[in-house]
Image (cartoon, grey):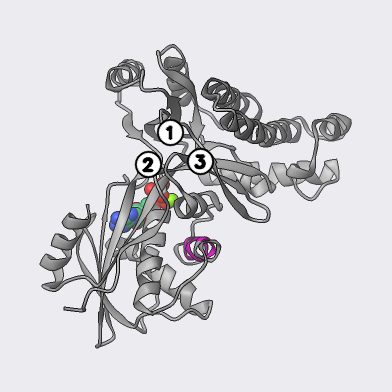
Amino acid sequence: MTERLITSFRSAYSREPEFIARAPGRIEVIGNHTDYNGGTVLGAAINRGTWVALARRGDGIRRFASEMRPGVVELRAEDAERRTGSQSWVNYPLGVLVAMKSSGIAIPAGFDYMAASNVPAGAGLSSSAAIELSSALVFLQAAGASLTREALVTLGRKAENEFVGVPCGILDQGVSCFGRVNHLVYIDCRVPRFETVPLPASAHFWIFNTHTKHALIDGLYAARHQECLDAAKIIGVPFLVDATPAMLAAAETRLSRTAYKRAHHVIDEIARVEQTVAALRAGDLAAVGKLLYTSHRSSRTWFENSSAELDFLVDCLEVEKGVYGARLTGGGFGGAVVALTSDAFGQEGAARVAESYLSRFGSRPEVIHALTDDGAALVTAGRSAG
Ligand code: ADP
Ligand code: MG
């Protein structure tokens, strides 16, 4: 991918890039809707990512291009307005620059910029965090600045929340930044704190993206968020992470049925994240898989953020050889299912699942096979400006 990116850079700008960075896409492995409840989550950085190449310019002109989008967007260094229409993708790198500046971090004035990616955009693998973090790394390098990985996570998230205007949680940037091959990333969202937990090299992930999306999805997320906060208040804790099953049981008569159900899911799900870490430390992928299925059932029954499509995929996967477990991944109400498998599951099994889905729903899910990979990093540095 680096060679392809350099070729694209040369053909767009007739020069060599000075800096290249890569950041991976990510999977939410377990911990559904736990982040804004102060809980924990486990994610995997995957072997698909976004690469950004950059060369400084002395004239204060910023030129942005991506293999994913036609043309070159040319801005002056003082242009920090949000872009719209076909240029709106530029809000990701531009938002990073704006966030850097407002945090007092040095930024390059002019540059030529090119992105290349094999993370499908909008498939729930966080191509957005991947472009933010790879952009941030080349901008920092070009300005001779550096940040801790924690600060890099905060920067990417700030760009997405405040400039792009997407209220993503910390999972996306946290996993893309702290990812490690043959490990999962464990995030304690309240602090936040990041750790890695070993995952046996024999483990594989398969994503089945339905590309379905509930029409009222933003409102549904907001409603779930509010229901969780309401439940915590009635239980008498700041966040649901502070509540125990016994506290929930004691508050049941004071909670609406809806608030009770949401809290039930979140409290159990946070416990399942801890159980998953313990199972991983024991190298017991069968136990991890069972926790994934339990998580899915909890999302379906208590949190009510599954769909007929997602339930169908999980049911299909459950009877396939080599599948340890499967669950909806991400916000829910449509979207994707992730399966944790051994190498006894492969293209054949995946095709069978996709065929069943096709005959039931009339469309083919996008199937992505992924392994864990390392987090955001510079690929090369210090070439001459050419
Ligand atoms: P996800 O993060 O799940 O892939 P998002 O909607 O959060 O989906 O982010 C996708 C958007 O990010 C794209 O529509 C595009 O604007 C931007 N984006 C991501 N990767 C690239 C890229 N390589 N080039 C240009 N834009 C990109
Ligand atoms: Mg995103």
Q: Is residue 251 visible?
A: yes
Ligand 1 within 8 Å of the CB at mark 2 = yes
Magenta residue check for 75: no
Q: Can residue 63 be seen in this view?
A: no
Instruction: Find residue 65 and report its image quarter.
Output: bottom left
Image disc number at residue 123: 2
Ligand 1 within 8 Å of the CB at mark 1 = no
Q: Are marks 3 and 2 in contact (CB under 8 Å)?
A: no
Image disc number at residue 336: 1
Nearer the observer, 123 or 379: 379
Badge 3 or badge 2: first in the primary sequence: 2
Q: Label 3: few (<14), some or many (≥20) within 10 Å?
A: many
Q: Label 2: few (<14), some or many (≥20) within 10 Å?
A: some
Residue 268 image offset from top left, x and y in percent: 70, 31
Q: What residue type is labelled 2?
A: Ala
Q: Is mark 1 on a helix, strand or loop?
A: strand
In-image side of 174 versus 227 (left or right):
left
Instruction: Find residue 191 and report its image quarter.
Output: bottom right
Residue 293 image offset from top left, x and y in percent: 55, 22
Real-space CA distance between mark 3 and mark 2, rounded to the nearest whole angstrom: 20 Å
Can you tell which of label 3 and label 2 is closer to the viewer?
A: 3
Q: Are marks 1 and 3 in contact (CB under 8 Å)?
A: no
In this rendering, the answer to whether 9 lies above or below 244 is below
Q: Quadrant of the C terminus?
A: bottom left
Q: Is mark 3 on a helix, strand or loop?
A: strand
Image disc number at residue 184: 3
Instruction: Find residue 63 and report its image quarter.
Output: bottom left
The residue segment tinted magenta is 153-160
